[in-house]
């Protein structure tokens, strides 16, 4: 551990010796995600991050988590079941970050978390990340921020193909074509990804991650009627096949199961853009998406059905948005739309459709009152059929003190509506003697139990059972950007998110046969705060490096209050006697490192036309919530070993660790690229606590680009 | 019954007192180590208990003595342990009048039984010392006594005591491993006030 820290320190020292120029992200580039309008990066008053196509290509990643996990301010964390990849932004859980592809939300979350490995990045032009609540434009879910994956558009006539082969017989094949003339533009993309999975505990039946393969097909068609109007149609289809084999140990049960899983996602997004006047344009769109998943597991010995799960979500959203360039200094954007959502799943105990409608409108004002100052303000109103309405305001200001030095500050609120699971979940685990009911059905279920004389006691205020409201955040971001010279620049951003009414499962009643009934309630209050620091430097034309660091402090405010009141205790590991926990002893929320660092180095060999990209990532120590005997057989022991339900200094933490990723590319005549790479070169593994950490992954990629010469 | 004798001998070896004075106990602190609570002969590879007797270990606080199972229907014992189940000799659990409640706080800080205390007796399946004395870590399959929570008791004789469970594992390891450390062995400390007052000093 000490040696690791020393290495980290040494690398920072070495890197800080290097001076340099701006990263490949230029401030005169355009960003759309922050304001839903085209805006120069240099005038975006919010904290943001851009991942360019070049960066994606240099690292050789193939799925979304590959590239996101290399950013210090972003954390790829496992889902509730201990596996999978969700995105944590500013220390907030994956549930609170909206993930968009070309501005449209990706649906199909599992217990709130969106699986990043569903998304291929071979078709990505850039990824725009806005940090801090963005509900004033995007509504529910955009509480921590927004990740917008912008895919390629057809600009010229060319074909790209790539073949990647990696450890564990993983293959990744991509083919894309761009076809463009004056009126028509068509982009087509296809990808197949397949892996044999991996096994971190070979003595247990089945693998840690079972084999799966998936296909992505995308088409983007654009037609320009005139300089004033154009029509676009974006479509994508995703399908995944999983071959599962698990050893499920739950309590005293030990069952071997086999089965298959299947995912489908189809999205259809036509939109029409019309310039009303020189100053006003209108976009009308109807985005629809259908997500479906099915899993069946059979007992290996008897062939009996052990577990089955079916889930279908339909999302339909017509929206109209207009931007008016009022004058040179002011821009107004207004939009309105409706979201129709239908969910149908075996998880709710029947196969009825559940509906939720949201009606919304938003207004935004972009204003440059004087040269050095720009102000963006906005507000959105959401009316939802299942819970009360929501206002989400936001204000952001940027001030350029001098040419190379600017300050930004923003305040805003974000919210996340209760999802279908929290409203309708109906789960009865007879073996483990508990049941979970969504807030919409729990009152009826309890009344029924009471009528049957099977209810022993209420464990929660009966007036509060069944009532649920959106989770709310109030956030402040404050930062500064400084360009020391053309070779060296730095950003620093402070953030604080105050979260209210976080939805948690809570024991609400006890039955006469000693079953505990759980439901969802707005219980918790928490905060996340921290500092993000980025330094980019270019030593010379060949070498460029970046250092990013995030300090994160994320805590449960109820726990802090209890500590203040002397109500939280720990157990001394030596004397075994209880003691009062002090504020200093409390580590904070699980699954979060206080310190995260990434150091990136790019080196270009011009003569050989070769590129070397090295990334060193550090995640500081953290603790985990326990996961016991889930359906895929994953059990992760909780870090809390002294029974006080919080992480404190005497708990069992996972030590900080380093990952080192290296990619070398060689380019021939701008058309053929050969790439060799190693992710997690030092082969860090922690099978018990981090089962989604795969170990060393070696890969070789061949990319080919064919361009039709302009005639 | 034939198992009890070796158990009792083992207990006497394990039980340690703060000093050697035997009679009469007026008020005293005790620390009991490795009191077996029907541990059987261990667990199999998937964690099932083997060879358990399904019998409580009965314990008397005044002289920290294990009481024979043949005396289960007497008032010779105050508290009984079987696995993670803890009973008090009273209510549905025994013929005695032992009653108690959980107290949340620091054991050493409680110098006197609070005036507003409500002593309750076992009423199966609602035991005074219910499951909330421990926190279960389902993936690690370990039991940890909840820190800052101990039991205040009033025995059949009307004597008060406070009792804090320190560990559920043999030799009280700091971070027990369910697959290595033997469970169903209690380590606890208690203070027994034999003079009928409510003072814990």
Image: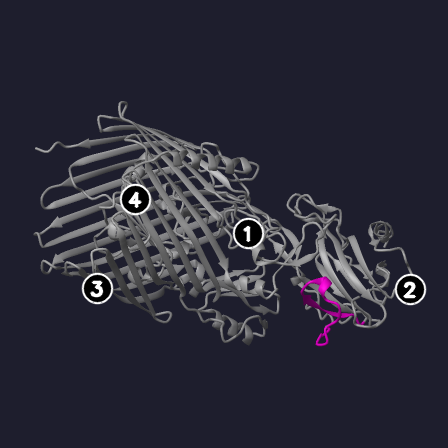
Read off the chain for label 2.
B
- Residue A280 falls in which quadrant of the image? bottom left
Quadrant in which the C terminus of chain A is drawn: top left
Read off the chain for label 4.
A
Observer-side mark, 3 or 4, equals 4
- Residue A360 falls in which quadrant of the image? bottom left
Read off the chain for label 1.
A
Q: Are marks 3 and 1 on the same chain?
A: yes
Whether A668 is drawn above or below B7: the answer is: above
Q: First in sequence: mark 3 or mark 1?
A: 3
Quadrant in which the N terminus of chain A is drawn: top right
Q: Are marks 1 and 4 on the same chain?
A: yes
Residue A193, horizontal then vertical, whole percent: 35, 38
**Residue pointed to by mark 2:** B24
Outermost residue toward the top in this view: A607
Q: CA distance from mark 2 to mark 3?
A: 86 Å
Using a 10 Å C-alpha cutoff, classify the residue at mark 2 as few (fewer than 14 neighbours), some (14 to 19) or many (20 or more): few
Circles 3 and 1: CB atoms closer than 8 Å: no
Q: CA distance from mark 3 to mark 4?
A: 35 Å
In the image, what residue occupies the spot 82% across and 50% down?
B14
Using a 10 Å C-alpha cutoff, classify the residue at mark 1 as few (fewer than 14 neighbours), some (14 to 19) or many (20 or more): many
Q: First in sequence: mark 1 or mark 4?
A: 4
**Residue pointed to by mark 1:** A626
Of the pair B145 and A106, the residue shown nearer to us: B145
**Residue pointed to by mark 4:** A483
């Amino acid at each position: 551990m000490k040696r690791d820290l020393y290495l980290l320190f040494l690398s920072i020292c070495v890197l800080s010796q290097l001076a340099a120029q701006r990263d490949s992200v230029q401030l005169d580039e355009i960003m759309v995600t922050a304001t839903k309008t085209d805006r120069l990066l240099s005038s975006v008053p919010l904290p943001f991050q851009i991942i360019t196509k070049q960066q994606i290509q240099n690292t050789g990643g193939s799925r979304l988590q590959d590239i996101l996990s290399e950013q210090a301010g972003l954390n790829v964390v496992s889902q509730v079941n201990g596996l999978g990849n969700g995105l944590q932004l500013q220390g907030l859980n994956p549930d609170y970050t909206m993930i968009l592809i070309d501005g449209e939300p990706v649906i199909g979350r599992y217990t709130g978390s969106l699986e990043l490995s569903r998304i291929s990045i071979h078709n990505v032009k850039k990824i725009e990340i806005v940090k801090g609540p963005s509900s004033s434009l995007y509504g529910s879910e955009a509480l921590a921020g927004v990740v917008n994956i912008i895919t390629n558009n057809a600009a010229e006539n060319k074909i790209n193909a790539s073949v990647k082969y990696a450890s564990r017989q993983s293959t990744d094949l991509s083919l894309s074509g761009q076809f463009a003339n004056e009126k028509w533009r068509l982009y087509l993309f296809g990808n197949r990804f397949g892996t044999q999975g991996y096994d971190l505990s070979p003595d247990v039946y089945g693998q840690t991650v079972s084999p799966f393969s998936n296909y992505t097909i995308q088409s983007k068609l654009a037609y320009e009627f005139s300089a004033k109007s154009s029509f676009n149609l974006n479509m994508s289809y995703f399908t995944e096949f999983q071959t599962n084999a698990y050893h499920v140990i739950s309590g005293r049960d030990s069952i071997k199961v086999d089965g298959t899983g299947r995912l489908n996602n189809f999205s259809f997004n036509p939109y029409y853009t019309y310039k009303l006047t020189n100053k006003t344009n209108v976009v009308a769109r109807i985005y629809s998406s259908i997500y479906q998943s099915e899993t069946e597991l059979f007992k290996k010995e008897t062939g009996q059905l052990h577990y089955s799960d079916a889930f279908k979500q339909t999302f339909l959203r017509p929206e109209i948005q207009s931007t008016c360039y009022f004058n040179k200094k002011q821009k107004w954007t207004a939009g309105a739309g409706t979201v129709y959502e239908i969910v149908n799943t075996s998880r709710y105990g029947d196969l009825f459709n559940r509906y939720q409608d949201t009606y919304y409108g938003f207004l935004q004002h972009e204003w440059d009152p004087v040269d050095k100052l720009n102000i963006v303000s906005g507000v959105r109103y959401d009316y939802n059929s299942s819970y009360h309405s929501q206002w989400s305001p936001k204000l952001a200001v940027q001030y350029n003190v001098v040419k190379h030095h600017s300050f930004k500050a923003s305040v805003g609120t974000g919210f996340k509506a209760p999802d279908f699971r929290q409203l309708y979940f109906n789960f009865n685990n007879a073996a483990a003697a508990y049941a979970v009911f969504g807030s919409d059905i729990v009152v009826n279920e309890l009344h029924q139990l009471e009528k049957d004389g099977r209810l022993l006691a209420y464990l929660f205020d009966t007036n509060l059972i069944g009532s649920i409201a959106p989770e709310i955040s109030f956030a402040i971001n404050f930062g500064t950007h400084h360009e020391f010279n053309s070779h060296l620049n730095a950003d620093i951003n402070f953030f604080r998110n105050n979260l209210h009414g976080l939805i948690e499962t809570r024991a609400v009643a006890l039955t006469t046969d000693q079953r505990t009934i759980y439901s969802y309630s707005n219980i918790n209050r928490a905060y996340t705060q921290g500092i993000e620091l980025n330094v980019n430097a270019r030593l010379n034309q060949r070498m460029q490096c970046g250092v990013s660091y995030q300090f994160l402090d994320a805590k449960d405010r109820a726990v802090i209050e209890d500590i203040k009141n002397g109500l939280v205790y720990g157990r001394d590991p030596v004397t075994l006697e209880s003691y009062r926990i002090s504020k200093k002893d409390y580590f904070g929320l699980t699954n979060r490192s206080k310190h995260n660092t990434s150091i990136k180095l790019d080196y270009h060999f011009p003569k050989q036309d070769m590129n070397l990209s090295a990334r060193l990532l550090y995640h500081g120590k953290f603790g985990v919530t326990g996961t016991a005997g889930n359906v895929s057989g994953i059990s992760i022991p909780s870090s809390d070993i002294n029974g006080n339900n919080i992480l404190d200094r005497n708990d069992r933490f996972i030590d900080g660790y380093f990952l080192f990723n290296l990619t070398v590319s060689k380019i021939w005549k701008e058309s053929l690229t050969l790439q060799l790479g190693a992710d997690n070169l030092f082969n860090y593994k922690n099978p018990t606590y981090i089962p989604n950490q795969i170990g060393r992954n070696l890969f070789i990629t061949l990319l080919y680009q064919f361009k039709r010469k302009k005639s | 019954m034939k198992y009890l004798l070796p158990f009792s001998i083992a207990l006497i070896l394990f039980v340690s007192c703060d000093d050697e004075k035997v009679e009469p106990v007026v008020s005293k602190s005790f620390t009991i180590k490795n009191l077996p609570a029907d541990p059987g002969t261990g667990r199999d590879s998937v964690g099932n208990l083997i060879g358990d007797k399904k019998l409580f270990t009965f314990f008397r606080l005044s002289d920290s003595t294990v009481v024979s199972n043949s005396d289960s229907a007497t008032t010779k014992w105050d508290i009984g342990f079987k696995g993670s189940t803890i009973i008090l000799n009273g209510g549905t659990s025994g013929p005695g009048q032992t009653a108690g409640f959980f107290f949340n706080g620091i054991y050493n800080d409680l110098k006197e039984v609070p005036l507003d205390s409500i002593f309750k007796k076992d009423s199966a399946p609602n035991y005074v010392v219910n499951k909330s004395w421990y926190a279960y870590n389902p993936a690690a399959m370990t039991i940890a006594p909840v820190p800052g929570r101990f039991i205040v008791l009033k025995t059949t004789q009307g004597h008060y005591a406070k009792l804090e469970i320190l560990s559920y594992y043999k030799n009280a390891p700091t971070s027990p491993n369910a697959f290595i450390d033997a469970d169903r062995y209690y380590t606890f400390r208690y203070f027994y006030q034999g003079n009928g007052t409510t003072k814990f000093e």
